[in-house]
Image (tube, grey):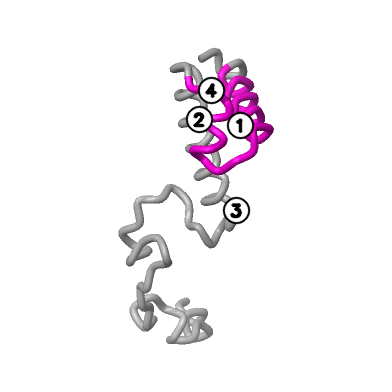
Amino acid sequence: MYTDLNLVRSDTLPEYSNYIDNGCDLFDSCLNCPLPRCRYDDPGWIQKEKIEERDMKIYRKRKEGCSIKILAKEYNLSTRTIHRAMRRIEKYNEEFNL
């Protein structure tokens, strides 16, 4: 009845694993990481999140009256990139009726 258990290697069982939780360059521990996704599961995810966060800051400052040239200088971006950031956030707001 339990003969199939003999086919399992003992080192595949979790209690015999030598897992060392080294984390990554963002957090010291994988098991205590606050990120919703592991950065190694989707390598571009962190970069995308940073760009979206930057775009939101640009959008808010622009709505407060900051000029495109000042934003470009502050974020070390071209004026064209500032316009793209504004367009991305405006499109997002339209999609979700914000």
Identify the residue position indicated by label 4 in the image.
Answer: 67
Which one is in front, 19 or 90?
A: 90
Residue 40 in the image, given as x and y percentages of width and height: 53, 62
Residue drawn 64% across the image and 32% down it: 79
Segment colored magenta: 66-93
Identify the residue position indicated by label 3 in the image.
Answer: 44
**Sequence-wise first label, 4 or 1:** 4
Residue 74 in the image, given as x and y percentages of width and height: 49, 38
Distance from label 2 to label 1 (Cα)? 7 Å
Whether label 3 touches label 4, CB < 8 Å = no
Which one is in front, 38 or 79?
A: 79
Magenta stretch: dominant SS?
helix
Task: Please state if 31 lies on the left or on the right of 65 as rendered.
Answer: left
Residue 57 in the image, given as x and y percentages of width and height: 46, 31
Q: Secondary structure under badge 1?
A: helix
For disc 4, the neighbor class at 10 Å (few under 14, some 14 to 19, many from 20) is: few
User: Which disc, if any, is residue 16?
Assistant: none
**Against 98, is 52 above or below?**
below
Identify the residue position indicated by label 2 in the image.
Answer: 58
Residue 81 in the image, given as x and y percentages of width and height: 65, 35
Q: Amino acid at mark 2?
A: Ile
Identify the residue position indicated by label 1 in the image.
Answer: 82
Q: Residue furthest right?
A: 80
Whether label 2 touches label 1, CB < 8 Å = yes
Residue drawn 52% across the image and 79% down it: 4
**Sequence-wise first label, 2 or 1:** 2
Task: Please state if 31 lies on the left or on the right of 96 as rendered.
Answer: left
